Amino acid sequence: MPSSRKATTRTWGWTDRAWPLAAGGLLLAATLAMRGGTPAAEEPAVAADKVAAFMRAKLDHSRLVLEGLAVADFDLIDRGAHDLALASQASSWQVLQTADYARHSDEFRRSCNGLRAAAKARNLDGAALAWMEVTMKCIQCHKYVRDTERGP
Ligand code: HEC
C-alpha cells in the first residue's frame, strides 16, 4: 500500500507551522534582549551609528529567513542565511576584538551555513531547527557583548 509513505512524510505536520512562530518569538527575544542595555563603550573601532545600522540589517536578513520558513520558500531561506553569514564577515561586525567574540562569530556563521544546507536540501524541519539554532546564537552573542561591555 502506498499509504505508508504519506504517514512518514507528514509526521511533523504541526511543527511546520509551529516552528517558524517559535523562531519568530526567539528572534523578538533576541532583539528585545539587545535593547536592554546600551552601555557607553570607551573607544569604538567603528562609528556607533554605522554599526547600529549595520546590526539592524541583520533583522532584514532574518525576516527573509522567517518568511521563507513560513511559506516553505527555500530560496528565500537560503538568501537570508547567506546574507547573515556574509554580514558576520564584514568589518563592521568586528565590534569586540576578543577571542570569545571571534568564537561567537564563528559559531554563528556555522549555524547559518547549516541553515543554508538544510534549505538546499529542501528540508523544512531541518531548516526550522537550524533557524532556532541561529537565533540562539544571536541571543548568546548579545548576552556576551552586554556582559563584556559592562566590565568588571
Ligand atoms: C557574534 C556576535 C553577534 C551575533 C551572533 C549577533 N549579533 Fe547582533 N549585535 C552584535 C553587536 C556587537 C551589536 C552592537 C551592540 C552595541 O551596540 O553595543 C549588535 C546589535 C544588534 C542589534 C541592535 C542594533 C541597534 O539598533 O543598535 C540588533 C537588532 C541585532 N544585533 C540583531 C541581531 C540578530 C537578529 C542576530 C541573529 C540573526 C544577531 N544580531 C547576531 C553582535 C552580534
Image (cartoon, rainbow, N blue to C red):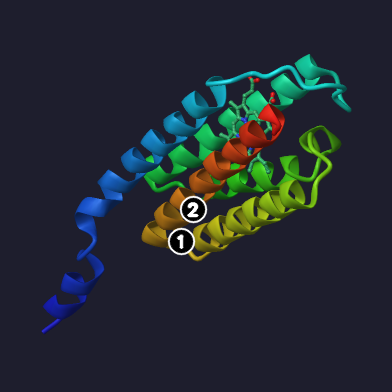
Q: Which mark is residue 144?
A: none
Asked where in the image residue 95 lies, by quadrant, the reply is: top right
**What residue does disc 1 label?**
122
**Looking at the image, which is closer to me, 102 or 110?**
102
Nearer the observer, 8 or 142 = 142
Image location (x, y in percent) of residue 65: 50, 41
Vertical position of residue 37 compared to residue 64: above or below: above
Q: CA distance from mark 2 to mark 1?
A: 18 Å
Residue drawn 45% across and 46% down? 73
Residue behind label 2 places its C-beta within 8 angstroms of ligand 1? no
Give amino acid for label 1.
Arg
Residue drawn at 58 percent across, 20 percent down = 37
Q: Is residue 8 left or right of residue 52?
A: left
Quadrant in which the C terminus appears:
top right
Q: What is the three-letter code of the residue carrying label 2?
A: Glu
Camera-nearest residue between 21 and 152: 152
Percent across and percent down for residue 57 are 65, 27
The quadrant where ligand 1 appears is top right
Residue behind mark 2: 133
Instruction: Pinpoint residue 20: horizontal percent, then vertical percent.
Output: 36, 43
Q: Residue at x 18, y 71 (%)?
A: 6
Element marked by disc 2 = helix
Residue found at the far bottom of this picture: 1
Q: In the figure, is residue 19 to the left or right of 106?
A: left
Among the two numbered marks 2 and 1 on one chain, the one whose residue lies closer to the N terminus: 1
Q: Residues within 10 Å of mark 1 (few under 14, many from 20)?
A: some
Image quadrant where one finds the N terminus: bottom left
**Vertical placement of residue 6 versus 15, above or below:** below
Crowding at mark 2 (Cα within 10 Å: few <14, some 14-19, many 20+): some
Closer to the camera, 140 or 138? 140
Q: Nearer the viewer, mark 2 or mark 1?
A: 2
Q: Is residue 13 left or right of residue 97?
A: left
